[in-house]
Image (cartoon, grey):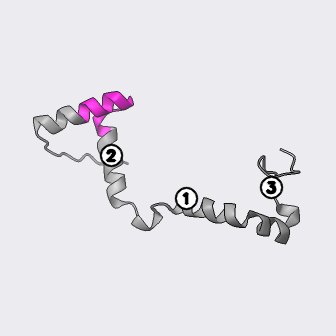
């Protein structure tokens, strides 16, 4: 269940929010809701996906060697079927 939250913004900020929402094909409410989610998101997760991808890229061959039956087919790997 969602709860209503009322905030007051000046005319200039409201105009900027409305302009941004229109440009992104969304609503002012959706923009503010996303900003609220971002404000409470765990900062330890920032960049976590990129760090994970980098680690996997650097160690993919080791994982494949250790677990050959579980190695996924990768399009960028030589000799691998897609």
From the image, give the main secondary structure of the stretch colored magenta.
helix
- Upstream in the sequence, badge 1 or badge 2? 2
Location of residue 60 (image quadrant): bottom right
Residue lying farthest left? 10
Residue 46: percent from left, percent from top: 45, 61
Ranked by sequence position, the earlier of labels 3 and 2 is: 2
Residue drawn where x is 55% and y is 58% of the image: 50
Neighbourhood count class around disc 3 (C-alpha, 10 Å): few under 14, some 14–19, many 20 upward: few
Residue 40, given in percent of the width and then of the height, sits at 34, 60
Residue 2 visible from this viewpoint: no
Write down the residue under mark 3: 72
Residue indicated by mark 1: 50
Tell me where residue 34 appears, x and y as whole percent: 36, 47
- The residue range painted magenta reads 17-29
User: Is residue 27 part of the magenta span, yes or no?
Assistant: yes
Density class for disc 1 (Cα within 10 Å; few <14, some 14-19, many ≥20) is few
How far separated are the C-alphas under marks 1 and 2? 25 Å
Q: Quadrant of the C terminus?
A: top right
Residue 20 can be seen in this image: yes
Task: Identify the residue shown where x is 29% and y is 33%.
Answer: 20
Circle 2 residue = 33
């Amino acid at each position: 269940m969602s709860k209503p939250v009322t905030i007051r913004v000046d005319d200039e900020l409201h105009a900027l929010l409305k302009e941004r929402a229109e440009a992104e094909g969304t609503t002012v409410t959706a923009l503010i809701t996303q900003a609220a989610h971002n404000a409470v998101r765990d900062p330890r997760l920032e960049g976590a996906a990129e760090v994970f991808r980098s680690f996997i890229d650097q160690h993919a061959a080791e994982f494949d060697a250790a677990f050959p039956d579980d190695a996924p087919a990768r399009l960028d790997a030589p000799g691998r079927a897609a």
